[in-house]
Amino acid sequence: MTQNRTHTCGELRLEHVGQRVKLSGWIENVREVGQNFAFVILRDFYGVTQVVIETEEQMALIHGLNKESTVSVEGTVRERSSKNKNLPTGEIEIVPEKIEVLGRCQYNELPFQVNRSREADEALRLKYRYLDLRNPAVKKNIILRCNVVSALRSAMTDHGFLEITTPILTASSPEGARDYLVPARKHPGKFYALPQAPQQFKQLLMTSGFDRYFQIAPCFRDEDARGDRTPGEFYQLDMEMAFASQDDVLGVLEDVLVPVFQKFGLYDRVTPAPFRRIRFNDAMELYGTDKPDLRIDLTIQDATELLSGCGFEPFAGNVVKAVAVSGFEGARKQIDKLCADVEVQAGEKAYWFRYDENGELVGGISKFLQPIKAELVEELGLSKGSFVGLTAGKRSTAQKTAGVLRTKLGAACPSHMDKEQYQFCWIVDFPMYEIGEESGQLEFCHNPFSMPNGGLEILKKAAAGEADPLSITAFQYDLVCNGYETASGAVRNHDPEIMIQAFQLVRLGEEAVKSKFPAMYNAFCYGAPPHAGAAPGVDRMIMLLSGEESIREVITFPMNQKAQDLLMGAPSTVEQKQLDELHIAITAQEDEE
């Protein structure tokens, strides 16, 4: 061990009784029993050990120290008369001969009690993250992260992948999110961009003759935060394979991820490979989302033909979806809250009725459904006691609202949701294009560098008006676990002619493609191999493995939801001299909060 300790605070046992030892750590707690008698709990990275104070001199020293001061203790190990079976070191204690102060805590009052820091306000936890991380319950997620990353690296190497790092300062390109821009001091008016992902670089590696690449890659996107996504920076297991098909990539990731979830996961059960594959359109029809939680056994049914003409105005002329569930016996107050929660999350209303134990339709919108009771019961397969939730609107709206309803009903019915497992599936055959919500024009749906099903031929038909661009699917795939997107990938479009044709459909001509993606376009012109890849999100993976609901709990130094680093005070103002060097003028200043 180091000069400041012979053992750690989690190491000593009965077999060490009688030995002279030296420990170092933080004072977690002091319990005074008498005038010159106290118990001190000493904590380090590895655990805690009880130290018994029995002299006036040592008592005076301890009395003058605040909690969280760091000390070294030299003394003898003895057996405890009152043992603590809940602690690995609970059968021994240290009788000190010498106590040395290594780092004094200057504050009588801490922002929060370290071993209960998870109960504190999150802003305080982030501001004093170095104290928060002293809590073993917080630290264990960071240890888990280290172990998982190590296992991922080992597994990828065993599969023949080379770990290659790619640049952090690169060029801005349209990849779906806002870039973080970095001004170039030596090139006034020009900017670097932090990479949203190493997408282009890893494809360039394939054209360079590398066969299998991976890295634990930092990615930077100027996005808003949510529970499963941190703003600003995240990490992914980025990988790419040359001369590979979709099946090749999916097979490798199944081989790599299943053992990791089996070894490190909170739950014992993990979907065995090969994972189920669900077409995007089928996922939307059955589950109302491209991130279905398959731990829930409920599916969505189409009730449009039966209900659109029932006389209930919100159904008229709309697609109607139904989620039928047995065993949901919520009172009216619970049902109203369920529907309100669906509306908050989906932005659309949910409706309901019951098919009660007497075989009658009751509650909600049941009065509109009485004339078609028999058909409704038969078509939806209702059993007595069933609850039915309903949604309506344009197809995508009705689907997505029903998806939220399905998830909330599953969570409310333990008999329909087997929570303690990891349920994986692949979502495949994503649409190549979609109509943008803001632009109202055709845009790439998932990844502009994906190979379309049908290749050049289907793109030419779409350009000629002989095929609907919205009907074109791509070799794109997402890995979903317990309702979270865990990885995303695609077979790449490595043919310059197909790339040009794909971008022309979204109003970007050949010259625009060459200017926006010059390196990749030119590289493909020198004979690129077919290649495919994916990128599981490391942060989200650790969140699932640990059972945390907030992704910030598995990141060592996370930002808050406003993309602020409360610990370091970022983002912050800089000196005018720095702005002048970068040829930047501030035209508007945000008010200080």
Image: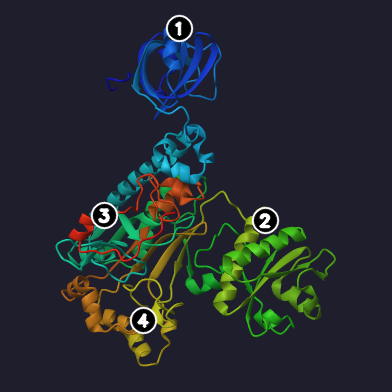
Residue designated by label 2: 413
> Which numbered disc flags the more N-terminal residue, 1 or 4?
1
**Mark 3 nearby-residue class (10 Å; few <14, some 14–19, many ≥20):** many
Circle 1: residue type = Glu
Which residue is painted at 31% across and 46% down in the image? 154
> Which numbered disc flags the more N-terminal residue, 3 or 2?
3
Cα separation between marks 4 and 2? 43 Å
Residue designated by label 1: 56
Residue designated by label 4: 454
Q: Quadrant of the C terminus?
A: bottom left
Element under disc 3: loop
Which residue is painted at 23% across and 59% down in the image? 579
Which of the 4 image quadrants contains residue 517? Answer: bottom left
Residue designated by label 3: 161
Q: Nearer the viewer, residue 181 or 375?
A: 181
Which residue is painted at 74% across and 76% down in the image? 376
Is 32 on the left-hand or right-hand side of 387?
Answer: left
Cα separation between marks 1 and 4? 85 Å
